[in-house]
Image: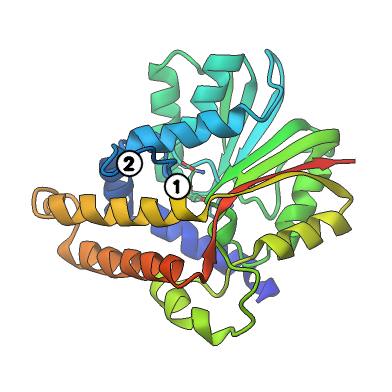
Amino acid sequence: MKADYKQAAKTAGDYYDSADADAFYAAIWGGEDIHVGLYERDGEDIAEASARTVRHMASKLDLAPGTRVIDIGAGYGGAARYLARKTGAQVTCLNLSEKENARNRKLTAQQGLADKIEVVHGVFEDIPFPDDSFDVVWSQEALLHSGDRRRVLKEVSRVLRPGGDFIFTDPMQADDIDDASAYQSIYKRIHLPDMESIGAYRAMLKDLGFETIEIEVLTHQLRNHYARVREELKARRHALEDRISPEYAGRMLDGLKHWVEGADAGQLAWGVLHFRKR
Ligand SMILES: C[S@@+](CC[C@H](N)C(=O)[O-])C[C@H]1O[C@@H](n2cnc3c(N)ncnc32)[C@H](O)[C@@H]1O
């Protein structure tokens, strides 16, 4: 699997660059964020709940003008714009989708933040920056796409300065399920070879010399989120038919159902994971 990280990156790039995916994420999430939201009530707006996740993560960090942040797998750059606007941090968005990067640059310029945000095309298995370049590495719902997560974590460690923070969210498998076959239907439907668990991330990061600051387990929000996205896509798929193909929408509805069922079966995990490089 490890030698395949370039293949996994290509698969992710082709997927996020596709017209269907671009239209789906922009239309359903609102064009800024594409990650799990924090919901405070049923039926809440997806963009609102997703923006709340960014604010919640940011509240755990000490960010100030000039703090150097890199968001790995940055999507449309919604988190970067929030961090730059609210704290004055200098944010680098690293992402392999040219389509998303183009939208990111456009939104960043429109919002007058081009002097604070740099959008770089690249993969997080080979972060194109020297050692100790950043005070914070940030990531949301991106590491699951990697074919070699240990390599990504090594890269995170390399580009972080000693004492720097690594904060991320990622859909994961539950720690206490040893039966790999339990995941096969989920992985097959979501086109992933596997996912990490909280325990596996902790162990790998400990090996790399990271201290655990906080593990906030919020798996119910993963369930809320995928159910909410499914509901929204179901309600709007016909209205969006000129932008999102019926085949894509059908496959997505099916995949989302598996996420919800996996969460209900206790097979999945999600939360905010915060580590510090010693
Ligand atoms: C679900 S989206 C999340 C985007 C963004 N973090 C957010 O929360 O809005 C996953 C992102 O990971 C990016 N990605 C996947 N594999 C990557 C890799 N190997 N290197 C860099 N980015 C990658 C995709 O291009 C996509 O932008």
At horizontal 71% and vertical 55% (from top left) the residue drawn is 152
Q: Position of residue 179 (x, y in %)?
A: 59, 85
Q: Depth check: 126 or 254 in front?
A: 254
Above or below, 58 relative to 111: below
On screen, residue 246 versus residue 214, left or right, reads left
- The residue where tag 1 is placed is 36
Total residue callouts: 2
- The residue indicated by pointer 2 is 29
Farthest-out residue, left: 238
Image coords of residue 264 (percent x, y):
42, 67
Label 2, secondary structure: give it: helix
Bin the neighbour count of mark 1 within 10 Å (Cα to Cα): few under 14, some 14-19, many 20 and up: many
Q: What residue type is labelled 1?
A: Val
Q: Does residue 164 appear in the picture of this structure?
A: yes
Label 1 vs label 2, nearer the camera: 1
Horizontally, residue 34 falls left or right of residue 201, namely left
* CA separation in Å, label 1 and label 2: 10 Å
Please determine whether, in this image, residue 172 is positioned above or below residue 181. Answer: above
